[in-house]
Amino acid sequence: MSDFEDLFSENFDKEQKAVALGYDKDVDPAPKVLASGQGYLAEQIVKIAKENGVEIRKDSSLVEILSVLEVDSFIPLDAYAAVAEILSYIYSKQK
């Protein structure tokens, strides 16, 4: 089945949410939302992340906070500690 056909099938979780974050410490004052979606779009965000070796972490509470933000928005203060912990873990694995 092609990706186009998949879009119109029932093979994905319509409730699943995903948020992709990015942070360039030389440019950004805080991490920001690069992509966000639910259902098929969330599935595609996760698929693309996996294909590109991007670290994935499931956190339903955090995704609820971040999924309401617009793309290119910086994360809110109440999510900063959780996101900082995730980024710290990822950066330590890359060294």
Image: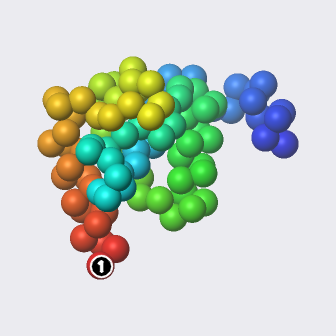
Q: Nearer the viewer, residue 24 or 67?
A: 24
Q: Nearer the viewer, residue 4 or 22?
A: 22
All told, the count of numbered labels is: 1
Q: Is residue 26 above or below residue 39?
A: below
Q: Position of residue 56 (x, y in %)?
A: 41, 52
- Label 1: element kind: loop
* Left or right, 81 with reference to 9: left
Residue 12 seen in the figure: yes
Q: Is residue 94 above or below residue 61?
A: below
Q: Position of residue 31 (x, y in %)?
A: 31, 44
Q: Residue furthest bottom?
A: 95
Q: Position of residue 69 (x, y in %)?
A: 39, 24
Point 55% across, 34% down: residue: 42
Quadrant of the image for the C terminus? bottom left
Residue 13 seen in the figure: no
* Left or right, 12 with reference to 4: left
Point 41% across, 37% down: residue: 33
Q: Residue furthest front?
A: 27
Quadrant in which residue 4 is drawn: top right
Q: Nearer the viewer, residue 63 or 27?
A: 27
Q: Position of residue 84 (x, y in %)?
A: 20, 49
Which residue is label 1 attached to?
A: 95
Tag 1: amino acid: Lys
